[in-house]
Amino acid sequence: MNIRETAERYVAECLKKGADAAEVYVESGRRLSVRIRNGAVETVQEAAGRGAGFRVFVKNAMAFAHSNDLSEKTCEKAIERAISFARITTPDPNNILPDDPGVGDAGPLYDPEIETIPLERKIDLALKAEETALKDARITLSGGANYGEGEGEIALANSHGLLKSYRATSCSFGVSVVAAKDDERSSGGESCGRRFFADLKTVPEVAERAAWKAWRMLGAKPVKTQRASVVFDADVAYALLGGILGAVNGERVLQGASFLAGKLDRKIGSGLMTLIDDGLRPKGPASAPFDGEGVPKRTRVIVEKGVLRGYLYNTIVAARAGVQSTGNASRGGFSSLPGIGPHNFYMEAGIHKPEDIVRATRRGLLVTEVTGYGINPVNGHFSGGVAGFWIENGKIVHPVRGLTAAGSAEEMLNGIDMVGNDLDLNRGLTAPTFRIRELQIGGV
């Protein structure tokens, strides 16, 4: 089935049945997952599916329906339901569709080799990851290993003449293990995800890091409540970005539910902090030529050397705010309406090696695990559970658990005084290692 033709045909059907404007989002894909434990294959699952979402507009009122069956009879019923819903919803003149025919250059996103690689090789990847991690004498249990892949095609058409599509793939593998010492247990895991199979890390890179993460936390000790420097390891540095993302969501800003509302072009953080949203990064996990409603994705600076430069918008929220869409319509699939979300969102790398940041810290905490909500996007308060390693005079002295770190967004963002050079752009939400000059740490 040609899903571009399908999308275009059902837009015409929406108009024929009474919609003033319409958008049809069609998705077709396949997913494979393999689960390993103790050298045996626990599960192999493959699923294929497709479906369409119908967003219709009647006298400025909008409604949505979807179907996981692309047959004409079923889709026509879904379209009729959407139109009947639109006739009872509240009109809004900002309920509009995009009309930009362009697409962004996201580079190659589809690996044709993934499907041709034998299943046995993919299973072997997970088996070897587990086997390699268990070779470490400090590792006593396997938490399991996995391999996964997905491929899909998306086509989007609307009544302004937009007709766009792209294909994309992804693949990943990982392992988790448990280390033990006397009565103490500690778990650790590592995974790697890429667009192309050939770009995956080697088994030793992933497995040995999983084992290291498990045993490195054995022997954790408490520390007293105090104010001290806090270094966020690159593995958890994304925790800072989550709250900022919520606060630069244009809908939150419009609702006054963001601590960054009204701060455009004002300094909100350290001059060492530059945040980028890059929907076109080559082979990026969230890269695509267009967003969830067909607007071309782009590369944007959201925070430039501590100065807030922009918010994220989809078409309807942008119209309400009196601005243009930034190409940040997010979509969970054919069954959901477009919301607002980032693409490949990251903090720019700095100049320091991570070990130099630790060496430059007289007393503080290297955070390697986080729990909790991070920065609250509404009020800017930060609080969360943390674990990691205590630093004294530039050296890691022992692991620590059961701590909290708390502060305000202003204190955290302005307190960044060192940024690492270890940025991993293969994550969709990522930051390098960075240090906050001082935060409140809750201990014993």
Image (cartoon, rainbow, N blue to C red):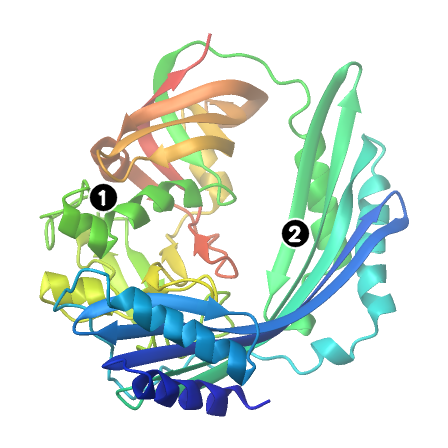
Mark closest to the chain's N terminus, 1 or 2: 2
Along the viewing direction, whichever of 157 and 250 lies nearer the viewer: 157
In the displayed structure image, the side of residue 277 where residue 10 appears, left or right: right
Q: Tell me the CA gap for discs 1 and 2.
A: 31 Å
Q: Quadrant of residue 413?
A: top left
Q: Badge 1 local density, few (<14 within 10 Å), some, or many (20+)?
A: many
Please tell me which residue is depicted at 17% across the width and 65% down the height of the picture: 318
- Amino acid type, mark 2: Ser
- Residue most extreme to the right: 40
Along the viewing direction, whichever of 320 and 70 lies nearer the viewer: 70
Q: Badge 2 local density, few (<14 within 10 Å), some, or many (20+)?
A: many
In the displayed structure image, the side of residue 332 where residue 14 appears, left or right: left
Residue marked by disc 2: 191
Residue marked by disc 1: 270
Please tell me which residue is depicted at 30% across the width and 47% down the height of the picture: 246
In the displayed structure image, the side of residue 292 where residue 266 appears, left or right: left
